[in-house]
Every structure is written in C-alpha cells, then in structure tokens.
Amino acid sequence: MYSLTGSGGPGTVYVNVPTLCLDRVNGAKVLTDAKAGKSATLTLNASFQNATSQYVIGWLPGKDYGTAQDQQILIASHTDAMSLVEEDGALGMLGIMHYMNHIPQSQRPKTLIFWFDTRHFMPGAEGAWSQYDYYLENPQLLKPIQFTLAMEHMGGRSTVEVGADGNDYVYAPGGPNSGALINSFIDVFNNNPWLVDTIKRSAEDNHWPRVAASDGGIAPGVNGGYQKSVNSPLNKGRSYTPNIPGIGLAGDWPGAWTQEYSQLNTEAGFHGFDENYFVAQVAGLSQITGSVMAKANFPITADFGWGNIASGLTCTLKSICSTAPVTGLLPDTQFVTPANAPTQRAELVAQYESAFWDVSRGNYASATTKLKTLATNVTNWILAPNQTALLILINNQIAKLAAL
C-alpha cells in the first residue's frame, strides 16, 4: 500500500515511491553489506495503473425465495489473489453451489447467496472500501440473512525451511497425517455450542487432517487458554449491524513469505496444492451449510445471547478473554464464597449447556425451567455487578423463548 496513512479507500493520496520487498535470505545479504559500508543501487521499475473490477453475487433460491418468509445464508470468498491456493475459495463456492443445486428448490429450506468479492487485495482491503459493500448499500437485504460462511486458502501444502541456514523452502514431505498440509483455521463468530459441534462433526466426517476452530478472545478454549482470532475478513457477519452469526475457513496458507514471494511453478501452482484436501474441505463446508439449512429453529439456536452467557460464566482473566464479555470478567473473587467458585462455576456452565441443548432440540419449556434455575443460582452464588449482567442475559433468553 503506497499511501501516506498505510490504508486505502477513495480519496487516498498515494506516495509516488514504490516499495521493494526482499525475502529473508536476500534481505540478510543486503543488511550484511550495509553494515560493512558497501553501497548498492536497488532499482524497481513500477507504475500505477487504474483498474475497475466487478464482484458477482448470485442466488440459489430456497423454497420461500422472493417472499417475506425467505431465510438466507451468505457465502463469500475473494477472487483477486495471485495464486491457486490463495484464490480457490471461489472454486469451493462453486462446489457448494453444484452440490446444493441437486436438491430441488422446493426442498431447500433456505436461499444460498454466493458473493465473489474483489476487494481483498485493494489498498486497505474490504473495510477501506465499505462504500462498495452491496449489503451496506442495500441494508434492507440483510434482514433475511441468518448465517454467513466464508472460505479462502484451501487445499494448501505446508512448507519447511531446509538446507544451509534454513534458506531453502520446500514442501513438507509425507502424507496428510505427517503435517504436510496447512491447518484449516475456522473463525467461529459466536461461541455457540451448536456451531462448534457442527464444525467438529463436519471435519471428522470428511477427514480433515488438521483443523482449529476459534472464537477469538471472548471465551477460554477447551484447555482454558487464550484463543487467537482467525485472520480473515471474509466472515461477513462481523461487519454488519446487527451482527450475523457465522463461520469462516481461512487456511494457514503456508505463511506470509509464500503470499509475498509466490512463484508460478511452486506454491502459486499445482505443486503447492493438494486436490484431495481441497475436496475434503469443500465437502465439510457443504455439510456445515446443509446443517444450517436444515436447522428449523436456527435463529434462536444461534442467538448471540447464548455465547454472551457462556463468556460471562467462563472468562476469568483479561489475558484469556482479550475482548471482555458484556458481563465483565468473572474471577473466583466475584463468587459469594470464593472457595466454592470452581465447583459452582462448573455447575453453572453445565446448567447453561443443558438449557442450550434443550433449545437446540426445540424443548423450550424444559430449557426455560433450567434457565430459571440458572438464574436462581447466579443470584445466590455470584456478586454484583456480574450477577446483574448475567441475570439480564438469562432473562432475555427466557423472554425470547416465551415469544416463540
């Protein structure tokens, strides 16, 4: 990005000085020569060229398409990258489209939207060009969208540094179980047990060799530690108000050096691409899409309130929950009897999870009873202000269930 601010967008003033990037190996040689007092001239012939791109949005209609009852899933990827692995999200979307098109429209519970975006490698990326976001231009079209799904960087092979001083990049040897394939990083927007379980089943059913699902720093991971956010902007639901729950797959393709220095006959082409892994990833994402399509009570199951309650009960340290939950952190000292905090916290989480799974199965009366028990225990066991914040969230979910 050649701009004074390092960002982009309409009206950006660009600096007429191109940037020359060197990889670690060649960069080390330049630094050594510079320290020795040597001089050199680096020449990069570059020019600016204005280009106009268009993105494509298509619909695979569901049974209620064109009516007020239509429910939609927004699937997105970018189409403006420089290599096969970076670019193949669009092929994955076509795979989902092809599969779902075999189901008659009358049997598709939800409409699928396919967004082939072209802003990913523009200066500042999608966020800097939000005025060209179709749904920000037409916010009334957001209402029927219940879920977003994104995909990029699929089917990539992992790389290792070998040779003298580790200066040679090669692909990891061996099969899928040897670490030779990149990780399937899944961004979960809303720490929702049903979404996490759906991802787990889809990854297992389709034999993904490496997968990590994370909701970022809003709740502890399964081992109680910090969860890093997945670095992908394509899970579109994060950028809209109100937010829309969703997931995004961003393969850890194979590292920043590859994106900067990809070459046609290596990582940018078929040498860096494992077609079997790609097919497995697309199959898994198709299964997730199908699960969301078939989930009759998806809006209440995926409601953000469930994730907020979970975060409010489990977040104890800022270093673990870098984005503090709306209830604030809940250390043991916020319990009426701190010595009982571990046991009582575990019981509260178990009650919450039991109520949630009742909701997922449509057992709303049972879920309401369990939520009321949870509220009673929160009142008896937790001090203000966490008590008040949690009670508000719990009572909100009870009210939503009563309205169904």
Image (cartoon, rainbow, N blue to C red):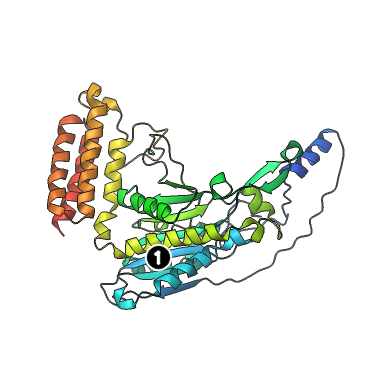
- Quarter in which the N terminus is drawn: bottom right
Q: Closest to the observer: 240 or 201?
A: 201
Residue 169 placement, left or right of 34: left
User: Residue at coordinates 39% horizontally, 35% vertically from top-left?
Assistant: 223
Residue 304 placement, left or right of 268: left
User: Residue at coordinates 87% horizontally, 41% vertically from top-left?
Assistant: 39
Where residue 16 sits: x, y (%)?
72, 57
- Quarter in which the C terminus is drawn: bottom left
Where residue 316 sits: x, y (%)?
34, 32
Identify whether 304 is placed above or below 87. Answer: above
Q: Closest to the observer: 87 or 118?
A: 87
Where residue 232 sits: x, y (%)?
50, 53
Q: What residue does disc 1 label?
A: 74
Residue 268: in sight, yes or no?
no
Where residue 294 sits: x, y (%)?
30, 64
Residue 183: in sight, yes or no?
yes
Residue 98 placement, left or right of 65: right
